[in-house]
């Protein structure tokens, strides 16, 4: 056992940043990234793969870029298996919020070591002492307050305290005594998956053990393949990677699932790998059908979650990663489905087929804009079927009036409801109770004709008002 221990080598920590929305997680990571990542190649960091390494005082730290990284919700459910250490970011101007409490409970439950970063100390309304008191109330036992949880006051905006925070991370990782076996077959965790037309399936992974090289066979519970190409977090080709390096792996035959562990072997896996089909069609009737496509699995997971929460009556016929294809449009045409594309594009042939088949496709880089567009699509604006210009008011009694005027467009009918406009603005609603044309009761008055109208309204109508009658198509 002693000899085995001597063979082990130290590995750098994998750190995840957690906290309430707007606590400053993204700003903190952006500051670290701009000042500490590949300083000789600053122009390339914009192409990073969602995880990156920094180097400080000869020590390396791997950060998982969780702000906006939808895949991490799944990883949290699996016990944050990829991270060795967490940073809990709490804003000094807002203190402990609901999401902060959820994160604290999670960290305590899975027993993941963490450091507290009290952010936004540059703000005038910052109250560090109150924030620390709130943390203590929720079981975060800070150092110097009877506990052993390290903490640091920082400003992610100005950079104050960030060097000290990084020093705490290095100290914590040294105490964790993180090791890997260079002779072990490489293994790790899939943190993101994309599918491109040019390169196929790209799996972003964090290596946890062994030395990863091309030409090894790779396997997860749902997918397998042979590593054709390895790239580091700057998307530069490399011949080998050691833990805890983030890496981009090309070679999977089918997309693995986010959060899965991967293993490798010199020989191909003996058993056949079965993959889940993308199409899930149910015979149960649905109010409307959807096809979901996204750039990567993390985005797809987030899209599906918000769609299911916002539109519980929707039936998802198919979900997958990559561009919107001809096959997607054919399926949408067959089942009268709407295609939703999140951070993805429509292939040229699919665009031509979309026009031919009259298929509705909604795409956006912003998830909430997708939801807004879908809501508008599913609840279309009512069509204006008639307009009536008020020329005279004959009688007013409580909430009923008798008015005279001209049908400007469409047909006016008894029982129709309307919006009442004054100087172009809606001021109330009404309903036609009776119609007269040439002093005779009628059911319909056509465009261009004069009419007397008995109307029930919640406002008093005056001459020059306009009544707009609409109907849902």
Image: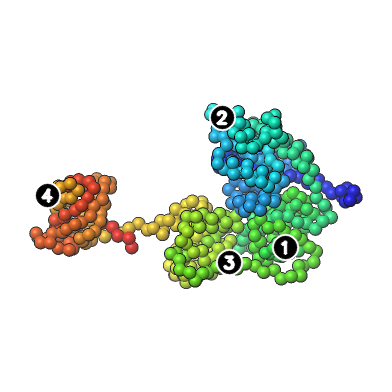
First in sequence: mark 3 or mark 2? 2
Residue 469, compared with residue 98, is above or below; it is below
Q: CA distance from mark 4 to mark 2?
A: 65 Å
Residue 278: mark:
3
Picture quadrant of residue 183: bottom right
Q: Residue at x 70, y 42 (%)?
A: 113
**Image quadrant occupied by the C terminus:** bottom left
Residue 280, compared with residue 27, is above or below; it is below
Residue 219: mark:
1
Q: Which residue is mark 2?
A: 126
Element assignment for label 2? loop
Q: Which residue is mark 4?
A: 394
How far from the left and from the top, in percent, is residue 201?
65, 61
- Please tell me which residue lies in front, 68 or 439: 439
How far from the left and from the top, in percent, is residue 311?
46, 58
Instruction: Mark yes or no: residue 107 visible.
Output: yes
Residue 142, compared with residue 76, is above or below; it is above
């Amino acid at each position: 056992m002693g000899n085995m221990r001597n063979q082990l080598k130290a590995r750098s920590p994998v750190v995840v940043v957690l906290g309430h929305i707007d606590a400053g997680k993204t700003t903190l990571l952006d500051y670290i990234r701009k000042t500490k990542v590949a300083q000789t190649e600053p122009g390339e960091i914009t192409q990073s793969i969602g995880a990156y390494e920094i180097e400080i005082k000869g020590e390396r730290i791997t950060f998982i870029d969780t702000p906006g990284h939808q895949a991490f919700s799944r990883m949290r459910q699996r016990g944050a298996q990829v991270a060795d250490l967490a940073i809990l970011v709490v804003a000094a101007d807002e203190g402990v919020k609901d999401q902060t409490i959820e994160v604290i409970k999670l960290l305590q439950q899975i027993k993941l070591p963490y450091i507290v970063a009290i952010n936004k100390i540059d703000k005038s309304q910052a109250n560090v002492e109150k924030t620390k008191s709130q943390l203590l109330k929720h079981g975060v036992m800070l150092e110097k307050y009877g506990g052993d949880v390290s903490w640091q006051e920082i400003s992610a905006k100005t950079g104050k305290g960030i060097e000290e925070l990084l020093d705490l991370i290095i100290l914590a990782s040294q105490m964790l005594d993180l090791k890997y076996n260079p002779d072990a077959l490489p293994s790790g965790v899939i943190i993101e998956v994309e599918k491109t037309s040019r390169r196929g399936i790209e799996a972003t992974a964090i290596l946890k053990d062994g030395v990863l090289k091309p030409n090894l066979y790779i396997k997860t519970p749902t997918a397998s393949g042979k590593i054709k190409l390895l790239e580091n977090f700057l998307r530069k080709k490399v011949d080998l990677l050691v833990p805890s390096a983030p890496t981009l792996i090309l070679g999977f035959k089918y997309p693995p699932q986010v959060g899965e562990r991967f293993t490798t072997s010199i020989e191909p896996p003996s058993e056949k790998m079965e993959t889940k089909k993308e199409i899930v069609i149910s015979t149960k009737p649905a109010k409307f059908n959807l096809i979901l496509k996204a750039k990567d699995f993390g985005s797809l997971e987030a899209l599906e979650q918000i769609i299911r929460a916002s539109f519980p009556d929707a039936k998802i016929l198919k979900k997958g990663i990559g561009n919107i294809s001809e096959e997607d449009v054919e399926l949408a045409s067959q089942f009268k489905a709407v295609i939703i594309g999140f951070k993805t594009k429509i292939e040229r042939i699919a665009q031509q087929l979309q026009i031919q088949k009259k298929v509705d496709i909604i795409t956006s880089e912003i998830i909430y804009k997708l939801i807004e567009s879908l809501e508008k699509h599913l609840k279309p604006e009512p069509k204006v079927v008639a307009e009536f210009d008020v020329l005279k008011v004959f009688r007013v009694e409580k909430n009923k009036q008798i008015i005279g005027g001209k049908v400007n467009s469409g047909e006016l009918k008894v029982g129709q409801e309307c919006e009442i406009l004054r100087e172009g603005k809606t001021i109330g609603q009404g309903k036609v109770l009776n119609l007269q044309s040439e002093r005779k009761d009628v059911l319909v008055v056509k465009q261009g004709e004069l009419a007397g109208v008995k109307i029930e309204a919640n406002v008093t109508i005056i001459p020059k008002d306009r009544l707009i009658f609409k109907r849902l198509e």
